[in-house]
Image (spheres, rainbow, N blue to C red):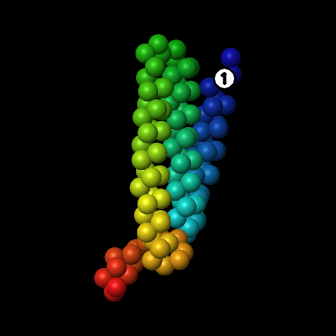
């Protein structure tokens, strides 16, 4: 059996890449993908600790499935907002998202 430290290192790398993407990117799609990386790091942690402690009640698995459902809803809402921004401005950047209300008032 693989030691839990490898799963924790994988989770740290995934979360770090996601956090770096959220901090440095200005494109909305890239930020959304970075958030997905961070949520997957949490999933790896839940399943690793569930397997390590030998829990029989599948607590880690159920939490991971819950996070996957939340991530799917977040992606659907985020993509709907990005489509609206792209239709209004032709580009998906954070500056355009903040001025979306101003663009609809000007029309």
Q: Position of residue 36 (x, y in %)?
A: 53, 48
Q: Quadrant of residue 41?
A: top right
Q: Element type at marker 1?
A: loop
Q: Give coordinates of residue 102: x percent, y percent.
A: 34, 81
For the C terminus, the quadrant is bottom left
Q: How many marks?
A: 1
Residue 65 in the image: state x and y as whole percent.
46, 32
Position of residue 38 measured from the top left corner of the image (x, y, whole percent):
53, 47
**Can residue 102 be seen by looking at this rendering?**
no
Q: Specify few, some or many for label 1: CA neighbours under 10 Å numbering under 14, 14-19, or 20 or more.
A: few
Which quadrant of the view contains residue 4? Answer: top right
Q: Is residue 54 above or below residue 5?
A: above
Left/right placement of residue 74 relative to residue 40 reads left
Residue topped by disc 1: 3
The reply to whether residue 51 is visible in this rendering is: yes
* Position of 22 relative to 74 (above/below): below
Would you say 78 lies left or right of 11 here? left
Q: Residue at x 39, y 78 (%)?
A: 99
Of the pair 87 and 8, the residue shown nearer to us: 87
- Quarter of the picture holding the N terminus: top right
Residue lying at 48% horizontally and 15% vertically, measured from the top left: 55
Give the vertical position of 24 relative to 98 (above or below).
above
Q: Looking at the image, which residue is at 33% across and 86% down?
A: 106
- Kindly give the residue lying farthest to the left in the view shown: 105
């Amino acid at each position: 059996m693989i030691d839990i430290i490898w799963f924790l290192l994988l989770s740290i790398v995934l979360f770090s890449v996601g956090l770096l993407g959220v901090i440095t990117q200005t494109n909305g799609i890239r930020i959304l993908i970075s958030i997905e990386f961070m949520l997957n790091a949490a999933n790896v942690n839940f399943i690793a600790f569930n397997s390590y402690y030998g829990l029989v009640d599948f607590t880690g698995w159920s939490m991971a499935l819950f996070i996957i459902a939340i991530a799917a809803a977040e992606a659907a809402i985020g993509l709907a907002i990005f489509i609206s921004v792209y239709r209004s401005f032709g580009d998906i950047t954070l500056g355009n998202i903040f001025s979306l209300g101003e663009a609809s008032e000007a029309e």
